[in-house]
Amino acid sequence: MYQNILDLPRDLGEGLVLRWATEADAEPLAHFNGIILEDETDSPGCVTNWTRNLLNGLHPTYRASDFLVVVDQKAGGKIVSTMGLLSQVWSYDGIPFKMGQPELVATDPAYRRKGLITTQFQVIHALSAVRGEILQGITGIPWYYRQFGYEMTLGLDGARWLYWGNVGKLGKDEQEIYQIRLANQNDISLIAQLYEQHCASSLIKRLRTEEEWKYALHHPCPEAVGYKQYYLIETLAGEPVGYVEYTPSTLFKRFNCRELAVLPGYSLRQVAEFLLRHLKAEAEELSKDQAVPYSCLSFNFGEAHPLYEALGQQLERQIKPYTWYLRVPDLPAFIRQIAPVLEKRLRGSPMEGYSGSLKLNFYRYQLALHFDKGELTEIGTFEPDKLQGGDALFPNLTFLHLLFGHRTLEELNHIYPDCQASSERTKILLAVLFPKQASQVVLLN
């Protein structure tokens, strides 16, 4: 079905050729992405090094052949456009599924408006389908990726900031009861367990294999996008307490913390207070002889995380999240994958044991979910007797906001008056099946 699309190289006319990248393209491609994609908000060389790390053959899930390049044969075969696919496994409330992340999408300004990105998306989407990926997601600039079937419908980043003046001090007769050290390969099993706890409040999360953990701990590159540094927090006797991932940003003069969890039986607040004192001291050391000191700590945990409750008003500034672009090429297949979640949500709810159909009208096509005593038995279609026929109306891709817990039906209706339910029963059923829930997906190293 997809063989013709994936059969490359392909002559695009005017001397342009689309082909798969090879390891020989690593340095030219890294240089190209650095020139096109880096801006004043990036650390110098971060995109260049990110590309190089993905193509050097060391990454456990990514190779040079996962990249597309368009080259200009009339200009010595120089790279003029590119796109890659980062294949991953995510989960939806505990149900794993394969997803693909198009990334490092770039075109030389002199070659834009020739349909090069459109052509590459067709190939990348075909490759993603062949790999069994039922979702594609991309982080990127406003509006642009809507052209290719994506909707901005999952939280991305978002943070709470803490300024050093809000860090408490130990009492006169108190001493630290914890210590911190760099994590190593022997800590992987424990860190993987703690990572699950860090992600517990997130509807969507990225699953990580042992090989990915080994790569994260063994191949950190401070000058690249996605650089992470992991630490173990222990008692003074060396007993593990929790883990944390943080790095200092030399560009923005702040510390960025992206992962944190403690083992059962330990106080998250107590551990966090130790961490704050440790990082404040580290910031003071790094700020020596600096014109601009490190001013704060950013907990980049999205909209919701237990730490926010643990530190309360010590966290002075809230940074609202941006959003992932998501694409669901086969909505029935995705819903079928997460059917156990929908059935679980019905149990114990006001709609427990529901039998009947939920007819979703997307105006251009329709979907019917059939339930029998709380079990999703069939996903089909229906023929509406009028334009607004069915139980609920969702124009364009607005249903994805509900599906991924990003917005409630009421919130959607406030923006889209033609996004609505036909009855109170339907409103309640939709709220039970698709409750609003924050997500913070930890990005691929």
Image: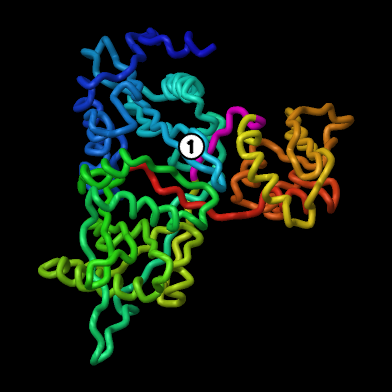
Residue 329 is a magenta residue = yes
Snapshot quadrant of residue 348: bottom right
Residue 110 is a magenta residue = no
> Is the residue 153 above or below the residue 318 in the image?
above
Please, which residue is most extreme toward the bottom here?
172
Quarter of the image with the C terminus is top left
Magenta segment boundaries in residue numbering = 324-332
Query: Horizontal and vertical percent for residue 182?
Result: 21, 58
Residue where numbered disc 1 is placed: 137
Please, which residue is most extreme toward the right here?
385
Q: Nearer the viewer, residue 200 or 102?
A: 200
Q: Is residue 276 left or right of residue 330?
A: left
Query: Horizontal and vertical percent for residue 49?
Result: 22, 38
Query: Pointer 1: residues within 10 angstroms few (<14), some, or many (20+)?
Result: many
Query: Horizontal and vertical percent for residue 228?
Result: 28, 50
Identity of the amino acid at label 1? Answer: Gly
> Is the residue 348 above or below the residue 83 in the image?
below
Q: Is residue 147 left or right of residue 351?
A: left
Please, which residue is most extreme toward the left here?
289
Query: Horizontal and vertical percent for residue 296?
Result: 30, 68
Is residue 415 something that shows in the picture?
A: no
